[in-house]
Image: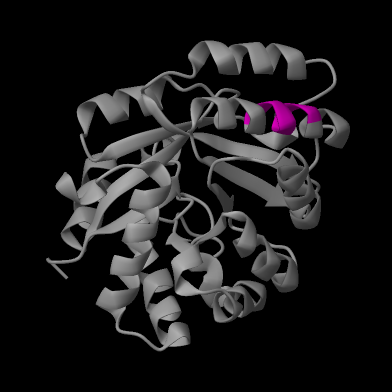
């Protein structure tokens, strides 16, 4: 395990659930081979703690996003302005941004407007995009195609049709797989159908863990990696190395140097 270098490409280590033990959570993950983390800092929740963690730990990187369900007709333009104001060289990606039909709050037309603006901004800044598409996978992919996104796109915890995902791979779209795969037939089918060079590891910690009612942690991406290795019939080290290479190409970061 010590020779492994896995990357958790999407997590929320700035969540208050990690306030009391963040150092041990990070140390445990790194000792198990998860060397780097990309925190999705959310404007609507406040990005100060994420910025602090990234300044303290050199192996933490940041993306900048907004929860889709927070976006409304009344605030989307203001959120676009805030997004442009805060986006700087401290962030290696845009996201998570996208659509959410599965939760209360938010308005889908406003979500679409903000999502399109985020995709355009990412293309202009040459930054990859991390997409949230709960209950709206095909819709989100359609917008990505319509906007002709010129940068890599990561579908985070994609819950849509596997056939749509297989087609999306042809359009520079990647899929990050969470530890909840062990309790999700859809995600298992997704991994079975997708090529290894289109997949990434994510924890989405503290959510989407192997147990629905327990806090998820980044070290659990090894659960995902083991499932993927088994499904693709390759060794664990091979699977992790390939997905780390995918992450390095997408984010243009040599993750394993830290």
- Residue 176, compared with residue 83, is above or below; it is below
Residue lying at the far left of the rendered structure: 2
Residue lying at the far bottom of the rendered structure: 233
Q: How is the image coloured?
A: one colour
Horizontal arrangement in the rendering, residue 118 relative to residue 47 (left or right): right
Quadrant for residue 169, please give it: bottom right
Q: Is residue 227 magenta?
A: no
- Residue 171, compared with residue 240, is above or below; it is above
For image coordinates 47% across by 49% down, the residue present is 206
Residue 19 appears in the figure: no
Residue 231 appears in the figure: yes
Q: Is residue 117 magenta?
A: yes
**In x, y percent, where is residue 34?**
26, 57
Which is nearer the eye, 122 or 223?
A: 122
**In x, y percent, where is residue 56?**
21, 28
In the picture, which quadrant includes the C terminus?
top left
Horizontal arrangement in the rendering, residue 236 relative to residue 224 (left or right): left
**In x, y percent, where is residue 54?**
29, 29
For image coordinates 17% across by 70% down, the residue present is 1
Residue range of the region highlighted in magenta in the rendering: 113-118
For image coordinates 48% across by 64% down, the residue present is 199
Please tell me whether the stretch drawn in magenta is mainly helix, strand or loop.
helix
Horizontal arrangement in the rendering, residue 237 relative to residue 8 (left or right): left
Quadrant for residue 75, please give it: top right
Quadrant for residue 113, please give it: top right
**In x, y percent, where is residue 233?**
40, 89
């Amino acid at each position: 395990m010590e020779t492994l270098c896995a990357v958790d490409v999407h997590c929320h280590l700035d969540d208050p659930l990690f306030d009391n033990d963040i150092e041990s959570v990070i140390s445990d993950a790194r000792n198990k081979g998860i060397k780097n983390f990309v925190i999705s800092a959310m404007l609507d929740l406040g990005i100060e703690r994420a910025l602090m963690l990234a300044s303290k730990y050199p192996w933490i990187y940041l993306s900048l996003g907004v929860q889709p369900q927070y976006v409304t007709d009344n605030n989307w333009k203001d959120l676009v302005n805030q997004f442009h104001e805060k986006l700087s060289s401290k962030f290696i990606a845009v996201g998570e941004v996208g659509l959410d039909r599965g939760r209360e709050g938010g308005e889908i037309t406003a979500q679409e407007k903000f999502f399109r603006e985020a995709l355009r901004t990412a293309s202009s800044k040459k930054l990859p995009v991390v997409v949230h598409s709960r209950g709206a996978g095909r819709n989100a992919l359609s917008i990505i195609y319509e906007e002709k996104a010129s940068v890599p796109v990561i579908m985070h915890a994609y819950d849509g049709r596997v056939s749509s995902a297989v087609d999306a791979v042809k359009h520079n779209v990647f899929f990050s797989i969470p530890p909840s795969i062990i309790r999700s037939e859809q995600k298992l089918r997704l991994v079975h159908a997708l090529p290894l060079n289109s997949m990434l590891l994510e924890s989405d910690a503290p959510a989407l863990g192997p147990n629905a009612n327990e806090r998820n942690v980044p070290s659990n991406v090894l659960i995902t990696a083991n499932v993927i290795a088994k499904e693709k019939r390759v060794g664990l080290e091979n699977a992790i190395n390939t997905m780390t290479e995918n992450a390095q190409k997408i984010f243009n970061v040599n993750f394993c140097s830290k």
